[in-house]
């Protein structure tokens, strides 16, 4: 483990030398935040970077550190950071790029002094599904079904479930698209087949006025959302909550009970007649739970009732608000949501009162200075 720490520390020292400041002697969250920001910036300024980059994995981070600082780290080094320092370098970079998938096949290369190039389709690999589809779109003389069967026998395409649908190819040809910039998060055979099946892509093809708009629609569709922490994902399952990017007025269907993250804990509250989550901070909007209630019927309950019952439930477990406050708790956002899940399991009438729910949590992807 000492070796792992020294390798990461070596990278931080190289970063300090580059900036001409005194080199650190220990791993600090501040230094790791700076490294995550630096690597994200290198990617954003790399030759070839654009909105198609919807994913990044450990492999790309390891390669980028080698290119930038000449230091070879391993996946074990990143695991050490995550376990011993609770710092997930991959997630921090994903958060800044808004690229939450780790399904990534592209490579980084040095193209000139101090600059990095993104090679979306490395020559050493077999042709990927997006390349095959682009070939079919461009070569109108080729029959889709025949080529898919032949590529499958060559081992560069999977079984029939991964084959392209002729009608989709014809629609893309009709639009005269060429060399479509497919998102990097869907390059695997099955993932790509799911993306370009008629149900998924036909409406985007029809809606787009040109290739640029089509690609924008496509990249937005594949952008994805942050993975929820396990404790929070459990509540999502129990409450049948829909995962959203952040709180917006359209998700605040009155009446509702809510919990959101604050700089030093979280707030528990209610909204019976007025929307309560419009003027909270951006970080709180991205880390919140909204439990919308039925407006009428025998199962209907007020948001005030949900709030008071849950606060009483927590008080019985010696979990109390901060002194001088009624609804602010100095507790982890994930722990309070986990406790609300336990509350739901115990109080079935609360569950029956639910109309629908929304949940979001990206704090694991935020830099420490921005996680508040």
Image (tube, rainbow, N blue to C red):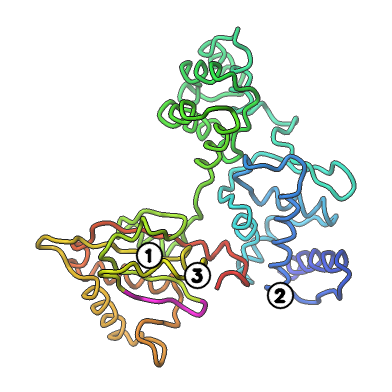
Pick the quarter of the image with the C terminus.
bottom right
Residue situated in front as seen by the camera: 30 or 327: 327
- Residue 264 lies left or right of residue 58; in this view the side is left
Name the residue that disc number 3 marks. 281
Q: Main secondary structure of the magenta part?
A: strand
Residue 257, magenta (yes or no)? no
Residue 238 placement: quadrant:
bottom left
Dot placed on the residue nearer the N-terminal end, 3 or 2: 2
Look at 87% across and 64% down and name the residue there: 18
Q: Secondary structure at mark 3?
A: loop
Q: Is 2 drawn above or below residue 185 in the view shown?
A: below
Q: Which residues are magenta?
A: 263-269
Distance from Cα at disc 3 to Cα at disc 1: 15 Å
Dot placed on the residue nearer the N-terminal end, 3 or 1: 3
Q: Is 12 drawn above or below residue 128 in the view shown?
A: below
The nearer-to-camera label among 3 and 2 is 3
Disc 2 residue crowd, few under 14, some 14–19, many 20+, Cα 10 Å: some
Disc 1 residue crowd, few under 14, some 14–19, many 20+, Cα 10 Å: many
Look at 69% across and 48% down and name the residue there: 59
Q: How many marks?
A: 3
Residue situated in front as seen by the camera: 71 or 361: 361
Q: Secondary structure at mark 2?
A: loop
Pick the quarter of the image with the N terminus.
bottom right
Residue 267, magenta (yes or no)? yes
Name the residue that disc number 2 marks. 28
Disc 3 residue crowd, few under 14, some 14–19, many 20+, Cα 10 Å: few
Q: Secondary structure at mark 1?
A: strand
């Amino acid at each position: 483990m000492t070796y792992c720490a020294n390798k990461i520390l070596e990278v931080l020292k190289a970063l300090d030398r580059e900036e001409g400041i005194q080199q650190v002697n220990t791993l600090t969250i501040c230094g790791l935040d700076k490294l995550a920001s630096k690597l994200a910036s290198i990617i954003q300024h790399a030759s070839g970077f654009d909105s198609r980059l919807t994913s990044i994995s450990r492999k790309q981070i390891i390669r980028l550190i080698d290119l930038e600082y000449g230091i070879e780290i391993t996946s074990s080094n990143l695991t050490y950071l995550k376990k011993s320092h609770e710092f997930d370098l991959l997630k921090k970079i994903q958060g800044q790029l808004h690229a939450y998938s780790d399904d990534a096949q592209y490579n980084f290369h040095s193209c000139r002094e101090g600059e990095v190039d993104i090679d979306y389709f490395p020559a050493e690999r077999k042709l990927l599904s997006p390349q095959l589809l682009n070939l079919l779109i461009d070569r109108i003389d080729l029959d889709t079904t025949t080529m898919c069967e032949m590529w499958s026998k060559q081992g560069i395409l999977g079984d029939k479930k991964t084959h392209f649908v002729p009608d989709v190819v014809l629609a893309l040809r009709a639009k005269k698209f060429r060399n479509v910039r497919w998102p990097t998060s869907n390059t695997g055979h099955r993932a790509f087949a799911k993306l370009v099946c008629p149900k998924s892509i036909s409406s985007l093809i029809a809606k787009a006025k040109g290739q640029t708009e089509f690609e924008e629609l496509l990249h937005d569709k594949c952008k994805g959302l942050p993975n929820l922490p396990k404790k929070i994902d459990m509540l999502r399952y129990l409450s049948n909550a829909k995962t959203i990017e952040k709180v917006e007025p359209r998700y605040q269907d009155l009446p509702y009970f809510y919990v959101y993250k604050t700089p030093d804990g979280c707030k528990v509250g209610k909204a019976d007649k007025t929307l309560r989550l419009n003027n909270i901070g951006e970080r709180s909007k991205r880390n919140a739970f909204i439990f919308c209630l039925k407006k009428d019927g025998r199962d209907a309950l007020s948001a005030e009732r949900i709030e008071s019952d849950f606060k009483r439930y927590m008080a019985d477990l010696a979990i109390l608000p901060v002194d001088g406050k009624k609804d602010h708790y100095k507790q982890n956002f994930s722990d309070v949501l986990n406790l609300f899940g336990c509350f739901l399991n115990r109080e079935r009438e609360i569950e029956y009162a639910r109309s629908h729910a929304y949940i979001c949590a990206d704090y694991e992807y935020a830099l420490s200075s921005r996680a508040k």
